[in-house]
Amino acid sequence: SAMTKTICAPQCNGHCFGPNPNQCCHDECAGGCGGPRETDCFACRHFNDSGACVSLCPLPLVYNKLTFQLEPNPHTKYQYGGVCVASCPHNFVIDHTSCVRACPGDKMEVEKNGLKMCEPCGGLCPKGGSGRFQTVDSSNIDGFVNCTKILGNLDFLITGLKGDPWHNIPALDPEKLSVFQTVREITGYLNIQSWPPHMHNFSVFSNLTTIGGRKSFHSTLSGSCRGFSLLIMKNLNVTSLGLRSLKEVSAGRIYISANKQLCYYHSLNWTRLLRGPKEGRLDIKHNRLKKDCVAEGRVCDPLCSSGGCWGPGPGQCLSCRNYSRDSFFCVTQCNFLNGEPREFANEDECFSCHPECQPVEGNVTCYGSVQYKSHSSLEREGQNCASWGSRPPGWAQRMLGFLSLTLSFTSPRAQMLVLSVPTSGMDHTV
């Protein structure tokens, strides 16, 4: 086909849809248009707001000419690349009017009304581990001490573990990998392509709950350049993943391949970890065959539910068949009638009774805990412990004496109310 070019009128600044002065493109158009309006642009100079090219996305505050006040804009939108969006992607952070991967140095990430936002620190910003390093090695690992959130990525490569003589970086002491036990979130990606031979899982990340995928690891491993947020490959001595707390991979793909001894991964419903669209985001292959794992007894503990597990034992279950204790360990039942400490259950998790509850033989000791009921100290013992009669001798008399002394500074009627309560009334089961 023949290429044609319209010669624009001088007033049109080089962008028009015809030769006449009234056939100029809108000022917010870039590269041409099909008409005079901001919705006729082929591309936008600044931002695209639902098909219209605009200089700014609708701001959070608008000026009310009648009240002379700035008021919240119900139609506010945020800048995401060259587009105005009503809400930022769930794995991004809101910084005033923009969707960003990470807050700037003078701000910290907070969560308000379910939204992640950047706010000024008001002093020193709290410490967050930086994943700006290309590879975790002996020269930078101490920078991750006491970090709960990695603001970026983590790469584990052979040059990081065994050292890099070209850059005069010595080998990494494997014991130092324990610094990652405090990490709960990685905002970027986790890439593990090398691991100490004597470490058979990644349990140093046992408290990691979220991989954000705000930035992905780009590779042609699966035939095309696709972004990965969790990549684990060619770790020949790893037998289980050990990522028992991982609940979400917010964006990006999962690639787990060529880990010749890896078992247990077959049992997991990986799609439960994925946030957003799930199609085409899993690439798990060339690990140990399921039949070989079963033959070797490398299967989930019987106390695990059908949801699968991250490794051997009752502490690696994705969820429990019966009850859980300390959030992770699956048990057949709680210490309802025997065992120490006595327990109660809340949503299939075992919790210890309040220390003031004395064990009741052959019956439950408590129905709740101070963690779950906001009664006063006097009320909570009666409401949550199974029996008043199990109190130490003289407890009721001492308590009435305390109340009588407290109310002696009030009215004579209040004194009569306290002194008229029979102590025997406090020795019954509720």
Image (spheres, rainbow, N blue to C red):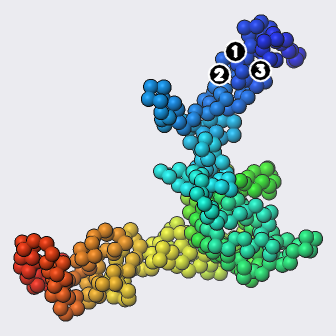
Residue marked by disc 3? 32
Say which quadrant the C terminus sits in.
bottom left
Outermost residue to the right:
166
User: Would you say the residues marked 1 and 2 are in contact, meaning their CB atoms lie under 8 Å apart?
Assistant: yes
Residue marked by disc 2? 39
Q: CA distance from mark 1 to mark 3?
A: 9 Å
Q: CA distance from mark 2 to mark 3?
A: 12 Å
Where is residue 314? Give x, y as percent.
Answer: 52, 79
Vertical relation: 315 (above or below) 31: below
Q: Residues within 10 Å of mark 1 (few under 14, many from 20)?
A: some
Residue marked by disc 1? 35
Is residue 125 found left or right of 222 in the rendered image? left
Q: Is residue 240 visible?
A: no
As helix, strand or loop, the secondary structure at mark 3 comes to loop
Where is residue 34? Give x, y as percent.
Answer: 72, 16
The front one of 258 and 124 is 124
Where is residue 202? Give x, y as percent.
Answer: 67, 74
Say which quadrant the N terminus sits in.
top right
Where is residue 301? Give x, y as percent.
Answer: 53, 78
**Disc 1 residue type?**
Gly
- At x 47%, y 33%, the residue is 69
The front one of 425 and 161 is 425
Mark drawn on residue 228: none
Q: Residues within 10 Å of mark 3 (few under 14, many from 20)?
A: some
Is residue 195 found left or right of 127 in the rendered image? right
Q: CA distance from mark 1 to mark 2?
A: 8 Å
- At x 48%, y 37%, the residue is 72
Q: Is residue 137 visible?
A: yes
Tell which circle, 2 or 3, labels the residue nearer the N-terminal end: 3
As helix, strand or loop, the secondary structure at mark 1 comes to loop
**Disc 2 residue type?**
Thr
**Disc 3 residue type?**
Gly
